[in-house]
Amino acid sequence: MADIDGLNAPKEFYTDIPQKSESFYLKGSNSLDWGMKNRLSRIFNPVSGKTVMLAVDHGYFLGPTAGLERIDVNILPLIPYADTLMITRGALRTMVPPDTQKAIVLRVTGGASILTELSNEDLAVDIEDALRLNVCAMAVQVYVGSEHEHQTILSMTRMVDMGLRYGMPTLAVTAVGKEMVRDAKYFRLATRICAELGAQYVKTYYISEGFETVTASCPVPIVIAGGKKLSEIDALTMAYRAIQEGAAGVDMGRNIFQSVAPVAMLKAVRAIVHDNETPEKAFELYKTLKNEKD
């Protein structure tokens, strides 16, 4: 018990200063609980309101794809330059040092491989394990319009319910099957379904026509997937256009770790996302940093 002898009488109540009720800076997040907002603020930079996520979870269905043969060798040097690492629990436990201070988004769905129907996914991680790992969000794949649409949507809603119980955000990742049309109409549908059913933010693909309607009609933050490997200038241009058209960040994988200069590329992407740099100037930054490395 605290020693109560010698306590000073309270006197500074600042009655002339009203207590502030601050609004949270992320779109659609103001009514969330404190713990969930705190986790989101570790993912999304409180100054810019945006995030640069590094996606390295491809192995859960692709195996050791190019650039991810050795996460401990190829990816650990990149972590300091990302805001968030998106990863599986196996890779996190076995290869990422526990003193890492970056936000972790944990892949929590699985069950299919590149050899089978990819949409046949379900929850593969319990939220208790996500809590044990002290992650900031859980990533759930959602296949709107696919053969297994129903089960993947319900997987997301179950994880949303568990996340709300414990203050853990859910990231809904919209997946597109090989036969699906990638247009604004589809992505408006997919992202809106995820948000309406409770996802705290959504990852989807950038499209060159109508992407601003996707971000405008989704009531929670959207981050874009990097997708297949592009040239550095094309990837930077995509990131720039997405941010200008309402995205709250990027989640890039192959366009970072398959680049000839991954650190330089990650820094260039950061310049676009957080500093509103143009793709041309970001590309010049990339080339300068690449040449310094060489």
Image (cartoon, grey):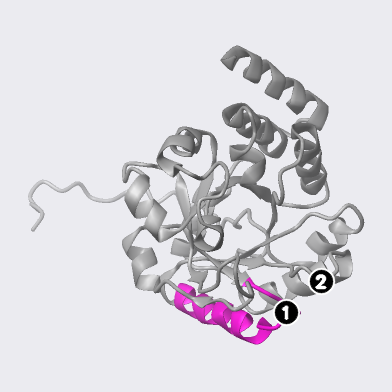
Q: Residue at x 55, y 80 (%)?
A: 155
- In screen coordinates, is 272 left or right of 166? right
Tell me where residue 55 appears, x and y as whole percent: 57, 50
Residue lying furthest front: 115
Determine the residue positioned at 64% across, 56% down: 26
Q: Over which residues does the magenta segment extend? A: 142-164
Look at the image and say whether residue 150 sits in the magenta stretch.
yes
Q: Name the residue beneath numbered marker 2.
A: 180
Look at 45% across and 43% down and name the residue there. Answer: 71
Residue 229 lies, in percent from the top left, at 71, 44
Quadrant in which residue 222 is drawn: bottom right
Confirm whether the magenta stretch covers residue 246: no
Contact flag, marks 1 and 2 (Cβ < 8 Å):
yes
Residue type, mark 2 in image: Met
The C terminus - image quarter: top right
Of 200 and 1, nearer the camera is 200
Mark 1, residue position:
146
